[in-house]
Image (tube, rainbow, N blue to C red):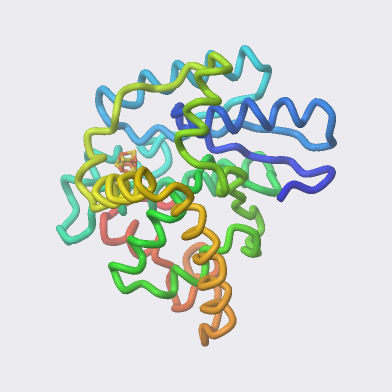
Amino acid sequence: MIHPGDAIGVAVSGGKDSLSLLHILKQISLSHNFTLQAITIDEGIPGYRDEALEIVSDFCNKIKVEHAVYSYKELFGSTLEQSLKIREEEKISSCSICGILRRRAIDFGAREFGVDRVATGHNLDDFIQTFIINLLSGDTNKISWMDPETTDNKARRIKPFCEIYENEIVFYAFANNIPFQSEECPHMNEGIRTEIRNFLNALEKNHSGIKNNMYKSILKISSEFKDKTDKVWKRCSKCGSDCTGDTCSVCKTLFNLGLGRP
Ligand code: SF4
């Protein structure tokens, strides 16, 4: 996923996954030819993000990785909480809006630092939960984009933990004394993800290895869908990113919420 000479942006939230990822990449970078830049997004969620910002800042100082913070307020003119108050389409969940803003904010940071790839801490559990969410919402297009290795964006997203179970990362964080945020986001249980997580954990408990089998199946399904997609890629008229219509989903959401575009 990482090539010699790459500048890697690491999206670091302050949770166990992203801090463990940064810790591992830092160690690998000492003997390989790539550089690291930590990028943290401040959504502006009261009582939640402050603890994480402090943890990430201290950790980056400790392991000597440059760190930058971008806030929704600064980039879009509105915190997540303010955006949620003005959303008209109630069917859009808090996490969907937050995810769209985060994607754009990380892209902005990646551009500022000229990074070649953005590494995120998504693990195997996240990956298969997302597949089920896409399946249940009927969004088969997103399934065709799930292959973690084949996206071709300028600042390509990579998921080095996509084959690692979440509980193994927790174990790694504890074993290496990596401090991570304990506070949960107040919006975390609004969507269906937590129910799917509990369901998959219950299955794994009784059928060891079932998540790993599912991961392999998803890769096959994703590549099948990718080959069959009849999508015609265009450029978004607002931001120039790849999309299938005139305007990408990020720009559409920013417009609907009356937010600024970084
Ligand atoms: Fe944003 Fe949802 Fe994550 Fe909270 S749980 S930080 S609202 S994506």
The quadrant holding residue 258 is bottom left
Which residue is found at the position 43% from the left and 56% from the top? Answer: 128
- Residue 19 seen in the figure: yes
Which residue is found at the position 50% from the left and 44% from the top? Answer: 123
**Residue 121: image location, x then y, percent:** 53, 40
Residues 132 and 109: in front is 132
The image shows residue 153, relative to residue 59, as above or below, that is: below
The image shows residue 199, relative to residue 35, as above or below, that is: below
Which residue is found at the position 56% from the left and 28% from the top? Answer: 20
**Residue 24: image location, x then y, percent:** 66, 29
Residues 125 and 21: in front is 125
* Side (left or right) of 194 relative to 58: left
Which residue is found at the position 47% from the left and 28% from the top? Answer: 170
**Residue 142: image location, x then y, percent:** 44, 68
Judged from the image, the quadrant occupied by ligand 1 is: top left
- Residue 240 seen in the figure: no
**Residue 210: image location, x then y, percent:** 44, 54
Residues 24 and 58: in front is 24
The quadrant holding residue 38 is top right
